[in-house]
Amino acid sequence: MVCLLSTNMKDFLFNSRSRPGSVGNPQCEEIVTDCVLINEAGSPAGSRLEEKARWVRRETLRIHGIAPSTRIASSLSPVEIFTALYYGNLLRFDPAKPYAPERDRLIVSKGHGSVSLYPILADVGYFDKKELLRTGTAESFLGGIPDPVIPGFETVNGSLGHGLGVACGVALAMKRTGNPANVLVLMGDGELYEGSVWEALMLAPEHKLDNLLLILDYNKIAMLDYCAKIIHLEPLGDKFKAFGWFCEEVDGHDVKAVHASLHKLMKQRNGSPKVLMAHTVKGKGVSLLENDSLCHLRTLSAAEVQLAVGALA
Amino acid sequence: MVCLLSTNMKDFLFNSRSRPGSVGNPQCEEIVTDCVLINEAGSPAGSRLEEKARWVRRETLRIHGIAPSTRIASSLSPVEIFTALYYGNLLRFDPAKPYAPERDRLIVSKGHGSVSLYPILADVGYFDKKELLRTGTAESFLGGIPDPVIPGFETVNGSLGHGLGVACGVALAMKRTGNPANVLVLMGDGELYEGSVWEALMLAPEHKLDNLLLILDYNKIAMLDYCAKIIHLEPLGDKFKAFGWFCEEVDGHDVKAVHASLHKLMKQRNGSPKVLMAHTVKGKGVSLLENDSLCHLRTLSAAEVQLAVGALA
Amino acid sequence: MSTQPLKTMRDAIIPAVTARMRADSSIYFLTADLGAPSLDQLRLDFPDRFINVGIAEQNLINVGAGLALEGCRVFLFGIAPFVSMRCFEQVRNNLSLLSQTRPVNVNILSVGAGFSYEVSGPTHHALEDLALMRTLPNLELFSPSDSVMAGAFVSYALSHQTPKYWRLDGKPLPVIYPAGHSFDFHKGFEILQRGDRVGLVSTGCLTHGALELCQSIPEWRDRVGLIDLFMLQPMDEAALQEQLCGYTHIVTLEEGFVGKGGLDSLVNRLVIQARHTATVDSLGIPPHYLFEAGSRAFLRQACGMDPAAIHRTVEQYL
Amino acid sequence: MSTQPLKTMRDAIIPAVTARMRADSSIYFLTADLGAPSLDQLRLDFPDRFINVGIAEQNLINVGAGLALEGCRVFLFGIAPFVSMRCFEQVRNNLSLLSQTRPVNVNILSVGAGFSYEVSGPTHHALEDLALMRTLPNLELFSPSDSVMAGAFVSYALSHQTPKYWRLDGKPLPVIYPAGHSFDFHKGFEILQRGDRVGLVSTGCLTHGALELCQSIPEWRDRVGLIDLFMLQPMDEAALQEQLCGYTHIVTLEEGFVGKGGLDSLVNRLVIQARHTATVDSLGIPPHYLFEAGSRAFLRQACGMDPAAIHRTVEQYL
Ligand SMILES: Cc1ncc(C[n+]2csc(CCOP(=O)(O)OP(=O)(O)O)c2C)c(N)n1
Ligand SMILES: Cc1ncc(C[n+]2csc(CCOP(=O)(O)OP(=O)(O)O)c2C)c(N)n1
Ligand SMILES: [Mg+2]
Ligand SMILES: [Mg+2]
């Protein structure tokens, strides 16, 4: 029977994906449904992106209210990154063809902290928004940690330190076949403690994987503490440079700046893999979480979610 | 019966170790037996060390003649390093008490390439020199790759990338108990490709393990090729520095220079772990091996060993 | 049993370790960035001997091994799939193998047996660790069923200079054994009920469900036995074999892959070695990953190892 | 048999892969800094698709997985203990688990089964990989006995989009099967001799010694059977079970730890599931590391799995 369940999921994943706008569930009414993908040519207005980021944050909090096991603080720090990628006309994707060869591959190595991608993926059409309401239940493919059974996710997530190496393989294959698409990886800063990450950091420059962009969600906190109280990561830029990466930094919550950096780096193809160190705040937007060294493990009560949502607007 | 064999070894290891000078086997006659440990105070004359290094190289070649499975090229590059440590009054050790608390711990992470330590350990008294003649046979504890069943070896070797992490634990314990001895690690350059090494490289500075000295046998070759043809390691000094290590370089075959660097670094205690990048030549001293990108796997025939020994003198 | 307060195994272990650390400066506690409320005191009291090595399971093992070589007695704290699988070769070479030549007292406190992290998906399910750790000579494999037993193992662990893997459930559980119960860690199992027909052999948290069935079904009395196997290695194999030979039907229970080297393989081997002709049914997780984010009860049911399935399996032999 | 030229398995595989690479640009060959003479041509001819990832087994698996996600068919080359144990969690998550949702054709060519690297000490002995890989759902576990079989698997491997672990002996061996022999990789075993009393079930290089005994002892004819099991997962379990049920005594042979989830556990389970009452003797390596640097024959003897031991074990049942 285990087998059957997973087969059902695959059926869902590959065949019966619903389109955006097809949702009429009243509980979903506050979810923005007027999402229009920004057209190919124009650069999106900053205010538009800020609005989107606020919406993503709100929906992420709501999902956490439904599925308290989700990692809320971790999921709030990359909101502007996801927003810029999906609504800023940066990432090439087609929800109707999740494995289209010309798509940009986004590999979410910090899987546990990417629940903020759920509302976006639903919004842009990867699956029905109703699905969000079932996050974390047995009937749903939306788990506490995303897996490739979710349309829009590429790889197995949940265990840290795997995404960059897999992305190197993907980027290598694309180089060889002349596929011009981008390979992006979102990684946590604590994840840098894993040796496997450094194996991949060594390999990429050797093979001139300039189609590879590592986005570091540099929120300064791992699980149990501030990174600086576990093992200092700084001078982190020097580390990346010594490993042969082109390195840039940005305020990870200034969505315009994030958009500009990503736009520039995704285009840049000069022989070096690229890393964007996005300085972020873990739990961004929720005062209960920001600056709490143990925010990683915090679960907000229904009342706290309510309050946090209110405070966003 | 497996059990018995190993118990025998342990017996040998812990109880029945013979002292230096007790050897009368005629086949051993060319082995220098007049070894006098340089006295505590004085610094050894350079020429004395050079002579010793030549002797170590010769004995290593001879052992290779006896046990062709040993990695000769890998074992020739750290000869001056071992010589300076054991004959240069640098390393504190007592063959009668291999686990004496006040000893300096030498962890040979590149176990496969340390057969040159066998004649030294026998010479300074860890075991009978007769044992050298049985290297690589079932009766001997001297295998193709050394293990902690050999008196004088601290840890399990053979699998790359383990030594530095274990050394961090050792150094940490010694810091906590106020033990002033040194912890030294000999590592290969290709070994740096292992992610586990970088986990240890991150940890050591955080805990201010300035009792830890990493000696890199920087011979520019791994197993299948030049490192620069696999993955460039340079700028390696920058990597170490960005990771918080005090970094120095030396010509790894200038035994006087090696001695001076080790002497300085072993004493240096200023809060940072230390790395000595010893530039070496894989297969040093044997023209058949030097500058051969595949020298790692080369086995010299009896005639070639003869020739190589002759060419040394 | 259900009226008792629930307790996690780590909440029994950590205070006991903390207490021992006060008197013994050779005890260290390392974590790969995993915490627990009961750890806060330890962190506070022993900043020098509590070390967070970061999210670096390989180095966790290696640093632990190094400390042990200096005579320290070490506890390593981490999430089960990661401290068993991410660093398997480190455990193998620097604990299991090294300990054949030098004393190495390192205790891997592996939190999250089986489906303990039920909603975190298959990367967090620990279904292989029993099989993996059983391949390691010289390593002791402890799989307790409640917090009393887990706490009691601290003393044993400190006085046995061997590497040990503690397979700890992640969830608060009721207690099975009275406080102060004296466990025979050399024998390695407890008989919770005696019977003459069907023998349940269970390890870890599944013992609770089995015990509940045993206690609530009057017809099972004297017919169905329950063995709580907590040392999978080493243990008194002859004693276990003798028990097994008292049943015509044996049912093994483990929250791990079935038929893949875990508890069931151990029992199969003992049965075959004894030339015993009992039937053996193995309940556990079929070889397939579960992406479903359901409750643990749901996941167990999906695997055919819920109480109803255990009940069905036993009943066919009564 | 001993007059035939000896050949390593890799020397059969690599030229076959090289030939296929000429016609198919989706095939990649990666190594963790391990070479072979037969690899030189491949390196030369396909500098773009031969990649040495360095001594980095974790990344070897991850990069291989990434290539496979782009539709590449990938071979990974490494030393058995390191490509099985150092990167076990990578194999588990990025091959075995990932392949449950997306096609992943990655072939781990694991060189050095058992004591192949006999003089390199226990870090180089691969005694756990059968057990470890058996815990991985969706992964095919291939353990050939000769180079003909190993070479024949290349075609199968390229056309099956699954992760596979090839447990390859490191030493040159005689061939057992004629060139061009057609293997049934779904069934997973070959019957090399039929018998009615004692059934030898062997995997990998040990099949050679068993076959030699079978062929040289006339009294064994029709009494002692020999099954060469080369697919440990998946395979036709019913067919194997049927064979096992034809014997009153079964002897398993593997160069791996015994009683720890390898071949013997697989056979024990099938015997028990069939409610078959045959005796099962398991020959393999007792749970202890060997530091001795002797020959392979010496190591086998030390473990009680040399030809004389096999002979003794069989004879007691004749
Ligand atoms: C290999 C592995 N080890 C440990 C964990 C447990 N874990 C989950 S999240 C986390 C902290 C991650 O910190 P960071 O990478 O900084 O991500 P953030 O949530 O801050 O974005 C840890 C230790 C894991 N998921 N995988
Ligand atoms: C984990 C691991 N992977 C692979 C090997 C096989 N191997 C043995 S030596 C070697 C090359 C080592 O190169 P380097 O570290 O530069 O040492 P050198 O011999 O040059 O001093 C390799 C790949 C190993 N021993 N351990
Ligand atoms: Mg972080
Ligand atoms: Mg080298």
Image: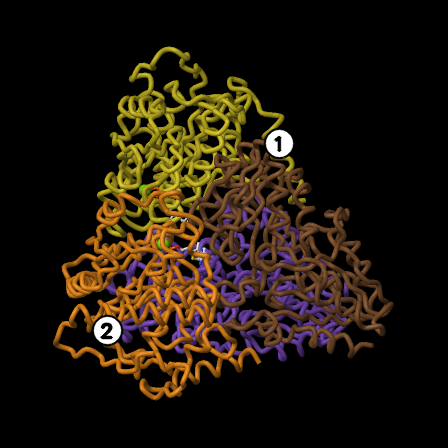
Chain colours: A yellow, B orange, C purple, D brown
Taking C25 as reference, is C136 left or right? right
Q: Amino acid at mark 2?
A: Tyr
Residue C152 shows up from this direction? no
Q: Which residue is mark 1?
A: D23
Q: Amino acid at mark 1?
A: Ala
Q: Which residue is mark 2?
A: B87
Q: Quadrant of residue C268?
A: bottom right
Residue A96 higher or lower than B193, as above or below: above
> Looking at this view, is D263 or C245 the one in front?
D263
SS for tag 1?
Answer: helix
Residue C265 appears at what percent x and percent y?
64, 64
The chain ID associated with circle 2 is B
Q: Quadrant of residue D104?
A: top right
Residue C214 appears at what percent x and percent y?
65, 66
Residue D264 appears at what percent x and percent y?
67, 65
Taking C65 as reference, is D222 left or right? right
> Looking at this view, is C80 or B246 the one in front?
B246
Residue A300 higher or lower than B127, as above or below: above
Q: Where, quadrant-wise, is the N terminus of chain A in this rendering?
A: top right
Residue D15 higher or lower than B61, as above or below: above
Q: Quadrant of residue A282?
A: top left
Residue A163 appears at what percent x and percent y?
43, 40
Residue C299 shows up from this direction? yes
SS for tag 2?
Answer: helix
The chain ID associated with circle 1 is D
Q: Residue at point 29% right, 73% down?
A: C26
